[in-house]
């Protein structure tokens, strides 16, 4: 193996220690404890695991964690009422509705009902629009974490060519926007299911972010020597040798990519811990804004 492993756990640990200090300072100086409400509708196993990790990280950083579990068969109105209640609750600075919602829910309507100043996921159209035009906003957590991971790998992003595979609202689109901002200054190409020959683009790229939701999307023969690979995929592969009966793999074929790249994120332990860390970062930032305005 040639590539350095970009350890998201270490970077997350460092940043979470700084966030915890920030939380303690805000409590001491302003008497404000950042509060995050995490709403989970239904029992999708991956979602249960994500929200549990988010709540644990929140408590470890010294924040208030409000856990809201709702059954999959509730009326959408109940969820909207709950969000309205949290929008008005001064103890809550961040509201997160875990996606995907069960079938039958209007995801856009639900996300739209979150007050933009508490939208620590950065998913509301207001925050997405602010990000696009470079106004102050909550940056979406996974894309923000990805930028931090590339910087942590030692690569200077300025002037580099980056390829993003995937065009989801949660990862692909926002990561392309963030990489091409003046501060980062990469030249970005977005590939997706409508791209006939993805390798034609990835072979030219200094940075490849793969967020396609499909194992084996990126292989070593598709990338340039010395490139940095960020693997956003989280795919469960059945594996009877594992206690849970599955193992996690990313969208990149790790071994073949690691033989060519200069640095690569592992799955698990790469992007995942950073998503949660940037959520804590946004929640602290939200609480700070409230404390400074009072
Ligand atoms: N589902 C997958 N990733 C995310 C995320 O970052 N936030 C929320 N709310 N749901 C998700």
Image (spheres, rainbow, N blue to C red):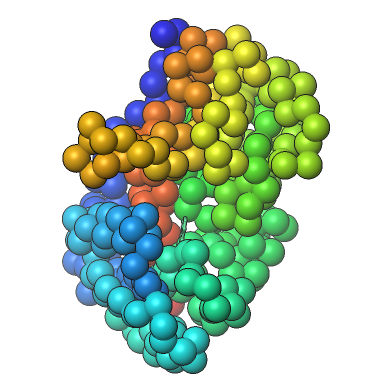
Give me the residue at 42% from left, 49% from top: 275
* Left or right of 55 in this view: 232: right
* Left or right of 238 in this view: 160: right
Image x and y of residue 91, in percent: 30, 80
Image x and y of residue 197, in percent: 78, 27
Quarter in which the N terminus is drawn: top left
Q: Quadrant of residue 239?
A: top left
Please identify the residue farthest to the front as the structure is shown: 240
Seen from the viewer's position, the closer of residues 80 and 7 is 80
Image x and y of residue 61, in percent: 23, 56
Give me the residue at 41% from left, 16% from top: 4
Quarter in which the C terminus is drawn: bottom left
Seen from the viewer's position, the closer of residues 158 and 188 is 188
Image x and y of residue 252, in percent: 52, 28
In this rendering, does residue 14 appear at all?
no
For residue 28, above or below residue 187: below
For residue 184, above or below residue 21: above
Badge count: 0
In this rendering, does residue 124 appear at all?
yes
Give me the residue at 55% from left, 78% from top: 104
* Left or right of 206 in this view: 5: left
Give me the residue at 23% from left, 44% from top: 244
Q: Quadrant of residue 12?
A: top left
For residue 65, above or below residue 230: below
């Amino acid at each position: 193996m040639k590539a350095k492993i970009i350890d998201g756990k270490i970077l997350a640990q460092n940043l979470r220690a700084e966030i915890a200090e920030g939380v303690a300072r805000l409590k001491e100086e302003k008497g404000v404890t950042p509060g995050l409400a995490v709403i989970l509708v239904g029992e999708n196993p991956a979602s249960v695991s994500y929200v549990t990790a988010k709540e644990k990280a929140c408590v470890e950083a010294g924040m208030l964690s409000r856990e809201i579990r709702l059954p999959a068969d509730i009326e959408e109105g109940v969820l909207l009422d709950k969000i309205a209640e949290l929008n008005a609750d001064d103890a809550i600075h961040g509201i997160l509705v875990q996606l995907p919602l069960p079938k039958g829910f209007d995801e856009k309507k639900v996300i739209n009902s979150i007050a933009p100043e508490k939208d620590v996921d950065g998913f509301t159209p207001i925050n997405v629009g602010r990000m696009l035009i470079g106004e102050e906003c909550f940056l979406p957590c996974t894309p923000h974490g990805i930028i931090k991971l590339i910087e942590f790998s030692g690569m200077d992003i300025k002037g580099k060519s980056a390829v993003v595979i995937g065009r989801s609202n949660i990862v692909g689109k926002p990561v392309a926007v963030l990489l091409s901002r003046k501060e980062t200054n990469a030249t970005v190409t977005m590939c997706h299911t409508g791209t006939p020959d993805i390798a034609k683009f990835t072979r030219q790229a200094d940075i490849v972010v793969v967020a396609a939701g499909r194992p084996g999307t990126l292989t070593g023969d598709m990338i340039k020597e010395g490139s940095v690979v960020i693997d956003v995929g989280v795919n469960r592969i059945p594996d009877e040798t594992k206690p849970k009966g599955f193992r996690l793999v990313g969208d990149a074929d790790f071994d073949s990519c690691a033989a060519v790249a200069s640095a690569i994120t592992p799955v698990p332990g790469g992007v995942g811990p950073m998503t949660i860390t940037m959520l804590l970062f946004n929640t602290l930032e939200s609480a700070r804004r409230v404390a400074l305005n009072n």
